[in-house]
Image (tube, rainbow, N blue to C red):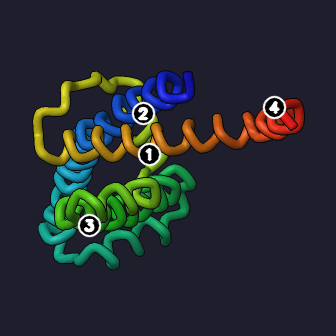
Amino acid sequence: MRRIIAGAGGLGLALILSQFPEYAQQYAQRLGGAVDELRIVTEDFDQAAAAGGLNREQALGRYEGSADNFIVGRGTAMAATFVRYEQLSATLAQIQGAGPVERFQSLPAYLDTDIGRRTLEAYKPAVPVTVEGILYAGGGFILGYLVLSGLWRFCALPFKRKRREAYR
């Protein structure tokens, strides 16, 4: 009975972990799309500033120096957009440069809550046909089997002692 339950736990964790490479790939695609769009906004702003004889900081200073609260707010929003672009670009570079194990260890730290949530909402499971997916599935099976087998044995300890005492 223990082996059946442990095997089921191993299969369950294998299915879950085998999906990680696909989720990471879908997340990286979504993150790349966000970076591409923010790059377009950033480059457009920088080109408009250059056409006016300004650099980015000088153009943002013009926003800040305005008497119009709406214009000041737009400048603050643009500055936040530039910060987000830099952060997401750095995260994308880290994910693309990471190996399978590094990505597994680090992805939770990379997850931008908005992009991560939207990735999960649109996530489509995939059959793991890559070496990475198969390795995650195998690791998940072994881990799930060992955890449930150990848990089963731990929970059965009080009953084994009673059985031993009954035979004496």
- Where residue 34 appears, x then y in whole percent? 27, 46
Q: How far apart, in angstroms, are the residues tagged by discs 4 and 2?
A: 29 Å
- Quadrant of the image containing the N terminus: top right
Q: Nearer the viewer, mark 3 or mark 4?
A: 4
Could you say which is closer to the camera, residue 148 or residue 58?
A: 148
Q: How far apart, in angstroms, are the residues tagged by discs 1 and 3?
A: 27 Å
Could you say which is closer to the camera, residue 37 or residue 115?
A: 115
Which of the two labelled residues, at mark 4 and mark 1, occupies the earlier sequence position?
1
Q: How far apart, in angstroms, are the residues tagged by discs 4 and 1?
A: 30 Å
Q: Nearer the viewer, mark 1 or mark 3?
A: 1
Disc 4 crowd rating (10 Å Cα; few below 14, some 14-19, many 20+) is: few
Residue labelled with disc 1: 143
Q: Amino acid at mark 4?
A: Arg
Dot 3 falls on a residue whose secondary structure is: helix
Q: Is residue 41 above or below residue 128?
A: below
Q: Which mark is residue 94?
A: 3
Residue labelled with disc 2: 10
Name the residue: 43% across, 50% down. Answer: 112
Q: How far apart, in angstroms, are the residues tagged by discs 3 and 4?
A: 56 Å
Q: Amino acid at mark 2?
A: Gly
Q: How far apart, in angstroms, are the residues tagged by discs 2 and 3?
A: 31 Å
Q: How far apart, in angstroms, are the residues tagged by discs 1 and 2?
A: 7 Å
Dot 1 falls on a residue whose secondary structure is: helix
Q: Which mark is residue 156?
A: none
Name the residue: 46% across, 38% down. Answer: 145
